[in-house]
Amino acid sequence: MIALAGYHFLILDMEHLLRAGDELMHCVRACESAGVSPWLRVPEVDAKLIGRALDAGVEAVVLPRVESAAEVARAVEAAFFPPLGRRGITGGRVTGFGRLPLPHYIEQANQACPIVPMIESAAGLRALPDILQLPGIGMVLEGALDLALDLQLGPDPLHPQVWQALQEVASACQHAGVPFCANPRTPEQHRHWQALGIRSYLAGEDRGLLHGALKKRLAELQPTT
């Protein structure tokens, strides 16, 4: 449904939700069938999980709350084949079960940028310049709500201090030539990011969007008296 609505990528979440492998595989197949890029947010940097996710057809691995370049470097190492990393090889579904020769697949995979860090803490802000120097970084996501909590500002993603931090993240990404993905929370924020040339956005969480749409529709149908 999300793919057919026209979205370009979908983040399957394992950070806050418990998901079994067979359920994730159904989601990956659905994404492939409908033409949307499947991404996976992992709970932590787990080399085996990252390798299995990429073997299953996940196209990007989202790393929540990254706080050091070393942490991201371990994820990069897990995502690339030697000599660039330490990922193990399989002739499974990503090679068409052997239709794509392994040397070609390894070359193709090692040219990708599948690692997507999320900046959600003060430590992440400090580490960002070093993170952006690493290979394999496809995009940087912001996590304004968790960032606000980490900065002791409460659950306030619109706090001016958080907004300033997001500007710094976007600027650092721009200077490093790494795409920045914004999560606009107001029309003003969206216009601001558009004016800066930002072209990647998070639309929000499906549960929240569905809940909001259902409440709005109910309000439209209820009597006005």
Image (spheres, grey):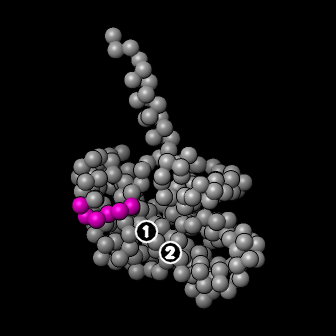
28 or 156: nearer the viewer = 28
Q: Callout 1: helix, strand or loop?
A: loop
User: Residue 50 lies in magenta, yes or no?
Assistant: no
Q: Which residues are magenta?
A: 195-200
Q: Is residue 32 left or right of residue 62?
A: right
In the picture provided, is 187 more to the left or to the right than 1? left
* Residue 211 against residue 20 in the figure, above or below: above
User: Which residue does the numbered mark 2 point to in the structure image?
Assistant: 113
Which residue position holds label 1? 139
Residue at 60% across / 89% down in the picture? 83
Q: Residue at x 55, y 73 (%)?
A: 75
Q: Which numbered disc, 2 or 1, marks the residue that appears first in the sequence?
A: 2
Residue 54: x and y in percent read: 63, 69
Tell me if I can see residue 217 in this picture: yes
Q: Is residue 198 magenta?
A: yes
Which percent across, then down, holds residue 188? 24, 49
Residue at image location 57% in from the left, 58% down from the top: 35
| Disc ID at residue 70 | none
Disc 2 to disc 1: CB gap under 8 Å: yes
Which of the 4 image quadrants contains residue 105?
A: bottom right
Task: Work out whether 98 lies above or below 3.
Answer: below
Counting from the top left corner in percent of width and height, residue 165 is at 28, 61
Q: Residues within 10 Å of mark 1 (few under 14, many from 20)?
A: many
**Amino acid carrying mark 1 in the image:** Met
Residue 15 shows in the view: no
User: How many angstroms separate mark 2 from mark 1 (CA)?
Assistant: 8 Å
Is disc 2 placed on a helix, strand or loop?
Answer: loop
- Residue type highlighted by circle 2: Cys
Horizontal and vertical percent for residue 41? 54, 59
Majority secondary structure of magenta residues: loop
